[in-house]
Amino acid sequence: MKKRIVSLIGAAVLTAGCLAGCGAQPDGGKTTGAEGKSGDLIPVTMAFCTWTGYSPMFIAKEKGYFEEAGINMDIQVIEDESTYASLITRGSIQFLATAVDPNIKMFANGADDRYVLTMDNSNGADGLVAVEGIETLDDLAGRTVALDKSASSYYFFLKALEADSNLTEADVQLMDMGDTTEAGLAFMAGNVDAAIMWEPELSEALEMVEGAHTVITSADYPDTIMDSLVVNTAFAAEHPEVVDAVEEAWYRAVDFLLANPDEAHELMASGFEEVTAEDIAADCEGLDIYGRQENEDLISGAGGRSIKDISQEMADFWMEKGECDSNDLSDFFLLIK
Protein backbone atom coordinates (compact mmCIF):
# COMPACT_ATOMS: atom_id res chain seq x y z
CA MET A 1 0.00 0.00 0.00
CA LYS A 2 1.25 3.50 -0.78
CA LYS A 3 -1.27 5.52 1.21
CA ARG A 4 -0.27 9.00 2.32
CA ILE A 5 0.38 9.12 6.05
CA VAL A 6 -2.60 10.54 7.96
CA SER A 7 -1.46 13.19 10.47
CA LEU A 8 -1.49 12.09 14.08
CA ILE A 9 -3.96 14.85 14.88
CA GLY A 10 -6.29 13.58 12.19
CA ALA A 11 -5.92 10.02 13.43
CA ALA A 12 -6.77 11.11 16.96
CA VAL A 13 -9.89 12.90 15.75
CA LEU A 14 -10.92 9.83 13.74
CA THR A 15 -10.43 7.58 16.76
CA ALA A 16 -12.46 9.84 19.01
CA GLY A 17 -15.27 9.93 16.48
CA CYS A 18 -15.27 6.16 16.11
CA LEU A 19 -15.34 5.61 19.84
CA ALA A 20 -18.27 7.97 20.18
CA GLY A 21 -20.12 6.01 17.52
CA CYS A 22 -19.38 2.51 18.75
CA GLY A 23 -22.51 0.61 19.62
CA ALA A 24 -24.78 3.32 18.26
CA GLN A 25 -27.36 1.96 15.85
CA PRO A 26 -29.32 4.35 13.63
CA ASP A 27 -33.12 4.22 13.70
CA GLY A 28 -33.22 1.59 16.42
CA GLY A 29 -31.90 -1.17 14.19
CA LYS A 30 -34.02 -0.25 11.15
CA THR A 31 -31.99 0.32 8.03
CA THR A 32 -32.52 1.21 4.44
CA GLY A 33 -31.24 -1.51 2.15
CA ALA A 34 -29.38 -1.21 -1.15
CA GLU A 35 -32.67 -0.89 -3.03
CA GLY A 36 -34.15 1.62 -0.58
CA LYS A 37 -36.45 -0.79 1.26
CA SER A 38 -36.67 -0.67 5.02
CA GLY A 39 -36.18 -3.95 6.84
CA ASP A 40 -35.74 -5.42 10.29
CA LEU A 41 -32.04 -6.24 10.37
CA ILE A 42 -29.93 -7.21 13.37
CA PRO A 43 -27.64 -4.26 14.23
CA VAL A 44 -24.01 -5.36 14.43
CA THR A 45 -20.83 -3.30 14.84
CA MET A 46 -17.39 -4.47 13.75
CA ALA A 47 -14.14 -2.58 14.35
CA PHE A 48 -10.63 -2.68 12.96
CA CYS A 49 -7.80 -0.31 12.10
CA THR A 50 -6.57 0.76 8.66
CA TRP A 51 -5.06 -2.46 7.33
CA THR A 52 -5.57 -4.18 4.00
CA GLY A 53 -5.90 -7.60 5.60
CA TYR A 54 -9.25 -6.59 7.11
CA SER A 55 -10.61 -4.77 4.08
CA PRO A 56 -12.40 -7.70 2.40
CA MET A 57 -15.07 -6.92 5.00
CA PHE A 58 -15.84 -3.83 2.88
CA ILE A 59 -16.47 -6.16 -0.06
CA ALA A 60 -18.97 -8.08 2.07
CA LYS A 61 -20.70 -4.87 3.07
CA GLU A 62 -20.80 -3.24 -0.36
CA LYS A 63 -21.88 -6.42 -2.17
CA GLY A 64 -24.75 -6.87 0.30
CA TYR A 65 -23.58 -10.15 1.86
CA PHE A 66 -24.37 -8.95 5.40
CA GLU A 67 -27.75 -7.54 4.45
CA GLU A 68 -28.71 -10.76 2.65
CA ALA A 69 -28.08 -12.54 5.95
CA GLY A 70 -30.30 -10.12 7.89
CA ILE A 71 -27.45 -8.03 9.33
CA ASN A 72 -27.15 -4.25 9.47
CA MET A 73 -23.34 -4.14 9.62
CA ASP A 74 -21.68 -0.96 10.86
CA ILE A 75 -17.91 -1.06 10.30
CA GLN A 76 -15.90 1.32 12.50
CA VAL A 77 -12.27 2.14 11.65
CA ILE A 78 -10.57 2.63 15.01
CA GLU A 79 -6.81 3.24 14.97
CA ASP A 80 -6.26 3.14 18.75
CA GLU A 81 -5.67 -0.55 19.43
CA SER A 82 -5.30 0.05 23.18
CA THR A 83 -9.10 0.47 23.39
CA TYR A 84 -9.98 -2.84 21.75
CA ALA A 85 -10.16 -5.09 24.82
CA SER A 86 -12.61 -2.84 26.65
CA LEU A 87 -14.76 -2.27 23.55
CA ILE A 88 -15.19 -5.98 22.75
CA THR A 89 -15.67 -6.94 26.41
CA ARG A 90 -18.41 -4.46 27.20
CA GLY A 91 -20.14 -5.17 23.89
CA SER A 92 -19.75 -1.67 22.44
CA ILE A 93 -18.61 -3.58 19.37
CA GLN A 94 -19.66 -7.14 18.62
CA PHE A 95 -16.84 -8.15 16.27
CA LEU A 96 -13.18 -7.12 16.32
CA ALA A 97 -10.50 -7.76 13.73
CA THR A 98 -6.93 -7.43 14.93
CA ALA A 99 -3.70 -9.42 15.05
CA VAL A 100 -3.72 -12.90 16.59
CA ASP A 101 -1.05 -12.00 19.12
CA PRO A 102 -2.89 -9.02 20.69
CA ASN A 103 -6.11 -11.03 20.55
CA ILE A 104 -4.45 -13.79 22.56
CA LYS A 105 -3.04 -11.32 25.10
CA MET A 106 -6.42 -9.60 25.46
CA PHE A 107 -8.25 -12.87 26.03
CA ALA A 108 -5.62 -14.18 28.45
CA ASN A 109 -5.96 -10.98 30.45
CA GLY A 110 -9.74 -11.12 30.69
CA ALA A 111 -11.26 -9.87 27.43
CA ASP A 112 -14.65 -11.53 26.97
CA ASP A 113 -14.46 -12.76 23.38
CA ARG A 114 -14.18 -15.86 21.22
CA TYR A 115 -12.17 -16.71 18.10
CA VAL A 116 -14.11 -16.83 14.82
CA LEU A 117 -11.57 -17.14 11.99
CA THR A 118 -8.11 -16.19 10.75
CA MET A 119 -8.10 -13.40 8.18
CA ASP A 120 -4.56 -13.12 6.86
CA ASN A 121 -0.88 -13.78 7.37
CA SER A 122 1.72 -11.07 6.79
CA ASN A 123 4.28 -12.33 4.31
CA GLY A 124 6.58 -9.33 4.03
CA ALA A 125 4.13 -6.49 4.65
CA ASP A 126 5.66 -5.79 8.09
CA GLY A 127 9.30 -5.26 8.87
CA LEU A 128 12.12 -3.70 10.84
CA VAL A 129 13.51 -0.69 8.98
CA ALA A 130 16.86 0.74 10.09
CA VAL A 131 19.42 3.41 9.28
CA GLU A 132 22.82 2.75 7.75
CA GLY A 133 25.17 0.82 9.99
CA ILE A 134 22.51 -1.56 11.30
CA GLU A 135 22.75 -4.64 9.13
CA THR A 136 21.83 -7.39 11.60
CA LEU A 137 19.74 -7.68 14.73
CA ASP A 138 22.92 -7.75 16.83
CA ASP A 139 23.75 -4.27 15.52
CA LEU A 140 20.74 -2.97 17.46
CA ALA A 141 22.63 -3.17 20.76
CA GLY A 142 22.22 0.18 22.50
CA ARG A 143 20.21 1.64 19.61
CA THR A 144 16.69 3.07 19.77
CA VAL A 145 13.87 1.06 18.17
CA ALA A 146 10.32 2.41 17.89
CA LEU A 147 7.36 0.04 17.93
CA ASP A 148 3.83 -0.33 19.26
CA LYS A 149 3.85 -2.71 22.20
CA SER A 150 0.07 -3.13 21.99
CA ALA A 151 0.35 -4.50 18.43
CA SER A 152 1.86 -7.65 16.95
CA SER A 153 5.04 -5.65 16.25
CA TYR A 154 6.27 -6.36 19.78
CA TYR A 155 5.86 -10.14 19.53
CA PHE A 156 7.43 -10.17 16.05
CA PHE A 157 10.45 -8.21 17.29
CA LEU A 158 11.03 -10.23 20.47
CA LYS A 159 10.69 -13.56 18.63
CA ALA A 160 13.23 -12.36 16.07
CA LEU A 161 15.69 -11.32 18.79
CA GLU A 162 15.24 -14.66 20.50
CA ALA A 163 15.77 -16.66 17.33
CA ASP A 164 18.49 -14.78 15.48
CA SER A 165 20.51 -12.55 17.78
CA ASN A 166 22.59 -12.56 20.92
CA LEU A 167 20.51 -9.74 22.37
CA THR A 168 17.65 -9.54 24.81
CA GLU A 169 15.03 -6.81 25.07
CA ALA A 170 17.16 -5.14 27.76
CA ASP A 171 20.01 -4.63 25.28
CA VAL A 172 17.86 -2.41 23.05
CA GLN A 173 16.33 0.98 23.83
CA LEU A 174 12.69 0.35 22.97
CA MET A 175 10.48 3.37 22.39
CA ASP A 176 6.83 2.38 22.84
CA MET A 177 4.67 4.37 20.43
CA GLY A 178 0.93 4.97 20.44
CA ASP A 179 0.51 3.00 17.22
CA THR A 180 2.50 1.57 14.32
CA THR A 181 2.04 4.68 12.19
CA GLU A 182 3.59 6.75 14.96
CA ALA A 183 6.59 4.41 15.01
CA GLY A 184 7.06 4.93 11.30
CA LEU A 185 6.80 8.71 11.67
CA ALA A 186 9.42 8.68 14.44
CA PHE A 187 11.83 6.84 12.16
CA MET A 188 11.21 9.12 9.19
CA ALA A 189 11.71 12.16 11.42
CA GLY A 190 15.13 10.84 12.43
CA ASN A 191 14.18 10.39 16.07
CA VAL A 192 15.07 6.68 16.28
CA ASP A 193 17.57 4.33 14.71
CA ALA A 194 15.04 1.71 13.66
CA ALA A 195 11.33 0.96 13.78
CA ILE A 196 8.91 -1.88 13.32
CA MET A 197 6.33 -0.71 10.81
CA TRP A 198 3.83 -2.00 8.31
CA GLU A 199 2.67 -0.75 4.98
CA PRO A 200 2.33 1.99 3.88
CA GLU A 201 4.91 3.48 6.24
CA LEU A 202 7.40 0.70 5.48
CA SER A 203 7.62 1.57 1.78
CA GLU A 204 7.48 5.30 2.47
CA ALA A 205 10.38 5.09 4.93
CA LEU A 206 12.52 3.20 2.44
CA GLU A 207 11.87 5.93 -0.12
CA MET A 208 12.16 8.98 2.13
CA VAL A 209 15.10 8.18 4.44
CA GLU A 210 18.51 7.99 2.83
CA GLY A 211 20.18 4.68 3.61
CA ALA A 212 17.04 3.16 5.12
CA HIS A 213 16.69 -0.57 4.56
CA THR A 214 14.85 -3.56 5.95
CA VAL A 215 16.75 -5.76 8.37
CA ILE A 216 14.00 -8.36 8.72
CA THR A 217 10.41 -8.72 7.49
CA SER A 218 7.45 -10.83 8.47
CA ALA A 219 8.34 -13.19 5.62
CA ASP A 220 11.36 -14.25 7.69
CA TYR A 221 9.21 -15.24 10.67
CA PRO A 222 6.04 -17.06 9.57
CA ASP A 223 3.06 -17.12 11.94
CA THR A 224 4.23 -14.17 14.03
CA ILE A 225 1.97 -11.56 12.40
CA MET A 226 -1.43 -13.00 11.59
CA ASP A 227 -4.84 -11.39 11.88
CA SER A 228 -8.02 -12.86 13.30
CA LEU A 229 -11.67 -12.04 13.89
CA VAL A 230 -13.21 -12.36 17.35
CA VAL A 231 -16.73 -11.87 18.66
CA ASN A 232 -18.14 -10.73 21.99
CA THR A 233 -18.99 -13.85 24.01
CA ALA A 234 -22.49 -12.84 25.12
CA PHE A 235 -23.44 -11.73 21.62
CA ALA A 236 -22.20 -15.04 20.16
CA ALA A 237 -24.34 -16.97 22.64
CA GLU A 238 -27.42 -14.90 21.82
CA HIS A 239 -26.89 -14.77 18.05
CA PRO A 240 -24.94 -17.84 16.86
CA GLU A 241 -26.58 -17.46 13.45
CA VAL A 242 -25.00 -14.01 13.07
CA VAL A 243 -21.54 -15.41 13.84
CA ASP A 244 -22.05 -18.06 11.16
CA ALA A 245 -23.33 -15.44 8.70
CA VAL A 246 -20.37 -13.11 9.27
CA GLU A 247 -17.97 -15.99 8.76
CA GLU A 248 -19.73 -16.95 5.53
CA ALA A 249 -19.71 -13.32 4.35
CA TRP A 250 -15.94 -13.20 4.85
CA TYR A 251 -15.41 -16.35 2.79
CA ARG A 252 -17.63 -15.00 0.02
CA ALA A 253 -15.65 -11.76 0.04
CA VAL A 254 -12.32 -13.58 -0.25
CA ASP A 255 -13.71 -15.63 -3.14
CA PHE A 256 -14.83 -12.40 -4.81
CA LEU A 257 -11.36 -10.93 -4.32
CA LEU A 258 -9.75 -13.92 -6.03
CA ALA A 259 -12.20 -13.88 -8.94
CA ASN A 260 -12.49 -10.10 -9.43
CA PRO A 261 -9.32 -8.45 -8.08
CA ASP A 262 -9.70 -5.07 -9.81
CA GLU A 263 -13.24 -4.45 -8.55
CA ALA A 264 -12.38 -6.00 -5.20
CA HIS A 265 -9.46 -3.63 -4.66
CA GLU A 266 -11.75 -0.66 -5.32
CA LEU A 267 -14.25 -1.92 -2.76
CA MET A 268 -11.54 -2.72 -0.22
CA ALA A 269 -10.13 0.80 -0.48
CA SER A 270 -13.53 2.46 -0.19
CA GLY A 271 -13.79 2.13 3.59
CA PHE A 272 -10.45 3.73 4.47
CA GLU A 273 -9.24 7.32 4.41
CA GLU A 274 -6.67 8.21 1.73
CA VAL A 275 -6.34 4.66 0.42
CA THR A 276 -6.60 3.81 -3.27
CA ALA A 277 -7.22 0.57 -5.13
CA GLU A 278 -3.58 0.71 -6.25
CA ASP A 279 -2.52 0.91 -2.60
CA ILE A 280 -4.57 -2.17 -1.77
CA ALA A 281 -3.21 -4.13 -4.74
CA ALA A 282 0.38 -3.33 -3.76
CA ASP A 283 -0.22 -4.27 -0.14
CA CYS A 284 -1.79 -7.60 -1.11
CA GLU A 285 1.56 -8.65 -2.56
CA GLY A 286 2.88 -8.99 0.99
CA LEU A 287 -0.22 -10.66 2.42
CA ASP A 288 -1.76 -14.11 2.33
CA ILE A 289 -5.50 -13.55 2.77
CA TYR A 290 -7.21 -16.65 4.17
CA GLY A 291 -10.46 -18.00 2.82
CA ARG A 292 -12.43 -21.09 3.73
CA GLN A 293 -9.83 -23.72 2.80
CA GLU A 294 -6.97 -21.94 4.55
CA ASN A 295 -9.05 -21.67 7.70
CA GLU A 296 -10.02 -25.33 7.56
CA ASP A 297 -6.34 -26.22 7.21
CA LEU A 298 -5.42 -23.96 10.15
CA ILE A 299 -8.04 -25.56 12.35
CA SER A 300 -7.07 -29.11 11.45
CA GLY A 301 -3.34 -28.45 11.25
CA ALA A 302 -3.25 -29.88 7.74
CA GLY A 303 -0.86 -27.17 6.56
CA GLY A 304 1.60 -27.72 9.42
CA ARG A 305 0.82 -26.10 12.76
CA SER A 306 -2.77 -25.39 13.73
CA ILE A 307 -4.14 -22.02 14.83
CA LYS A 308 -4.43 -23.48 18.33
CA ASP A 309 -0.73 -24.40 18.31
CA ILE A 310 0.27 -20.95 17.04
CA SER A 311 -1.92 -19.21 19.60
CA GLN A 312 -0.70 -21.41 22.45
CA GLU A 313 2.89 -20.55 21.62
CA MET A 314 1.97 -16.88 21.88
CA ALA A 315 0.17 -17.36 25.20
CA ASP A 316 3.08 -19.34 26.65
CA PHE A 317 5.55 -16.69 25.44
CA TRP A 318 3.68 -13.82 27.08
CA MET A 319 2.98 -15.83 30.22
CA GLU A 320 6.73 -16.34 30.60
CA LYS A 321 7.27 -12.61 30.05
CA GLY A 322 4.75 -11.82 32.78
CA GLU A 323 2.30 -10.10 30.44
CA CYS A 324 -0.47 -12.73 30.52
CA ASP A 325 -2.55 -13.67 33.54
CA SER A 326 -3.24 -17.09 32.03
CA ASN A 327 -2.16 -19.26 29.12
CA ASP A 328 -5.35 -21.32 29.10
CA LEU A 329 -6.99 -20.76 25.71
CA SER A 330 -9.53 -23.58 25.80
CA ASP A 331 -12.53 -21.25 26.06
CA PHE A 332 -11.18 -18.95 23.36
CA PHE A 333 -11.73 -21.58 20.70
CA LEU A 334 -15.15 -22.83 21.83
CA LEU A 335 -16.85 -21.66 18.63
CA ILE A 336 -14.68 -23.81 16.38
CA LYS A 337 -16.83 -26.58 14.98
Image (spheres, rainbow, N blue to C red):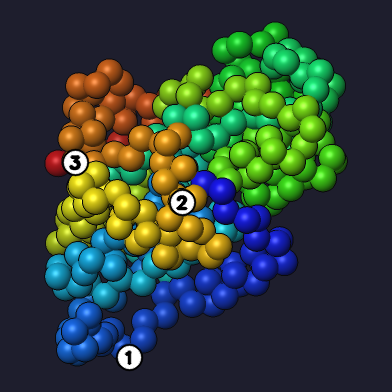
User: Which of the pair 327/312 is nearer the observer?
Assistant: 312
Secondary structure type for disc 3: helix
Give residue 171's position: percent from left, percent from top: 78, 20
Position of residue 234 in the picture relative to residue 13 (left or right): left
Please rate how many residues cluster around mark 3, counting C-alpha atoms within 10 Å: few if below 14, some from 14 to 19, many from 20: some
* Residue denoted by label 2: 278
How far apart are the two marked residues, 2 and 3, measured between alpha carbons? 26 Å
Front disc: 3 or 1: 3
The reply to whether dot 2 and dot 3 touch (C-beta < 8 Å) is: no
State the residue at coordinates (65%, 49%): 181
Position of residue 292 in the picture relative to residue 164 (left or right): left
Q: Which mark is residue 292?
A: 3
User: Which amino acid lies under the numbered mark 2 shown in the image of this protein?
Assistant: Glu
Quick check: can you spot residue 90? no
Q: Is residue 38 above or below residue 274?
A: below
User: Which amino acid lies under the numbered mark 3 shown in the image of this protein?
Assistant: Arg
Quick check: can you spot residue 311? yes
Q: Earlier in the sequence, mark 1 or mark 2?
A: 1
Give residue 163's position: percent from left, percent from top: 57, 12
Q: Is residue 218 above or below residue 167?
A: below
Q: Earlier in the sequence, mark 2 or mark 3?
A: 2
Residue furthest out toward the top: 166
Position of residue 244 in the picture relative to residue 9 (left or right): left
Give residue 62's position: percent from left, percent from top: 28, 68
State the residue at coordinates (53%, 71%): 18
* Residue denoted by label 1: 27
User: Which amino acid lies under the numbered mark 1 shown in the image of this protein?
Assistant: Asp
State the residue at coordinates (49%, 50%): 279
Front disc: 2 or 3: 2
Front disc: 1 or 2: 2
User: Which of the pair 322/132 is nearer the observer?
Assistant: 132
